[in-house]
Image: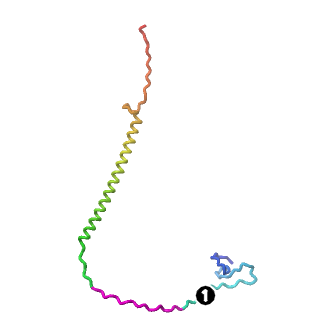
Amino acid sequence: MHHTPHAPQPFAAPVLYTQDGTPYYAHPTPLTAPPALYHPAAALPVPAQHAAPALHYPAPLPQVPTMPARDPWPARLVAGGVGIGGAGIGIGFLAQALAAATTALGFVTAGLAVIWLLKTTNGGGRGGQGAVNVSVNVTNRNR
């Protein structure tokens, strides 16, 4: 017999299954007799349902035919104009934010370029030359 795991129930003994799938009760104490066949619990009978009392609803009001409404074209034009204007304002704000970001990026890049140029040229126009060591020997031959 092999044991298949099931959720344990505190009031029922565990169930073991044979190779062909026949379920048997397994008892926690050593068995003195062959295990009993497992029979699933029968479904409990459902008590008869009593019919709900009939509900009485008031009669519906008579439907009055309605006249077709006029096409609200001015309202649709105004709504469309407001929507298009709102989209235009949104696109304008987006363009303004993009311009501000690129301007700031340009200023930062220009500042870094100026710093780099000043560093590499030492502030002079000779391009990367450092200090010049000068050695002067003066001899007086007219003596």
Name the chief secondary structure element in magenta.
Answer: loop
Residue nearest the observer in this picture, 31 or 64:
64
The N terminus, quarter of image: bottom right
For the image, the number of numbered tags is 1
Residue 11, position as x, y percentages in the image: 66, 81
Residue at 72% across, 78% down:
28
Residue extending furthest toward the right: 32
Q: Residues within 10 Å of mark 1 (few under 14, many from 20)?
A: few
Residue extending furthest toward the front: 58
Q: Is residue 98 visible?
A: yes
Q: Tell me the magenta residue range.
A: 48-64
Magenta stretch contains residue 39: no
Q: Is residue 17 left or right of residue 108?
A: right
Residue 6 in which image quadrant: bottom right
Amino acid, disc 1? Ala
Residue 71, position as x, y percentages in the image: 24, 75
Residue 4, position as x, y percentages in the image: 64, 76
Residue at 41% across, 30% down:
129
Residue 126 in which image quadrant: top left
The residue carrying mark 1 is 42
Q: Is residue 16 left or right of residue 65?
A: right
Q: Secondary structure at mark 1?
A: loop
The C terminus, quarter of image: top left
Q: Is residue 72 left or right of residue 139?
A: left
Residue 27 in which image quadrant: bottom right
Residue at 26% across, 65% down:
81
Examine the rendered structure and indicate whether residue 124 appears above or below residue 9.
above
Examine the rendered structure and indicate whether residue 112 appears above or below residue 88.
above
Examine the rendered structure and indicate whether residue 124 appears above or below residue 143.
below
Residue at 31% across, 62% down:
87
Residue nearest the observer in this picture, 119 or 61:
61
